[in-house]
Amino acid sequence: MLLKKDWLLLQGFLSVLLGVLLWFYPDLFVKATVILIGVLLALYAIVAFVTVMKDKEMNGASQAIMISAAISFIVGIILLASPALFVNLLVIIILGIIVIGLGLLQATEINLLKHQRKSFSALHYVSPVIIIIFGLLVIIQPAQAKFIVKLCAIGICYSGVSGLLYTFCLRKAVRHDSQLSENKE
């Protein structure tokens, strides 16, 4: 249980840090994300190509991997060569997905907390619902790139802060349960 609590605490701090960095350096963050995706696609292509070339038989799966590797390499190089072409749309969608994922993760954390506490309010689910709505708005309305990046920063910070609060509540509930167990013995 200690490992889960520590992970939740680390996740909350990292979310707040990511949100703050995103708020102050949105252009750098967006460009770095596109470049990172380009590097990952190019590396995947190289690894896939080398793996297929080591295989002595060229079958249908090998050919599919080679085609996938070639497409990944081309897209990766294009992203690396001119990230500005893809910055707005690609990164906005990725940020929306990240924010939705954080909302779903927070809902999971709340379920964990729900099982640890006897009194629990459905209002705890307001936070992840707000975060998920933020993410959906980002994906649906990608026209205002900088404004949406700022919204994502707020959503990620909010997710981090509320995640930290849930982690502290979980720690308190676990500590309380362990004290009750010790008192019964």
Image (tube, rainbow, N blue to C red):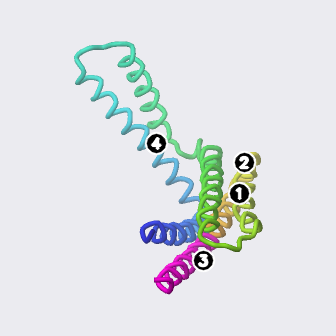
* Sooner in the amino-acid sequence: mark 4 or mark 2: 4
Residue 148's label in the rendered image is 1
| Residues rendered magenta in the picture | 160-185
Residue 38's label in the rendered image is 4
* Sooner in the amino-acid sequence: mark 1 or mark 2: 2
How far apart are the two marked residues, 4 and 2, measured between alpha carbons?
Answer: 21 Å
Asked if residue 126 lies left or right of residue 27, the reply is right
Looking at the picture, does residue 154 appear above or below residue 41? below
SS at mark 1 in the image: helix
* Residue topped by disc 3: 169
Q: Is residue 169 magenta?
A: yes
CB within 8 Å, label 1 to label 2: yes
Residue 142's label in the rendered image is 2
> What's the amino acid at mark 1?
Ile
Quarter of the picture holding the C terminus: bottom left
* Sooner in the amino-acid sequence: mark 1 or mark 4: 4
* Sooner in the amino-acid sequence: mark 2 or mark 3: 2
Q: Nearer the viewer, mark 4 or mark 3?
A: 3
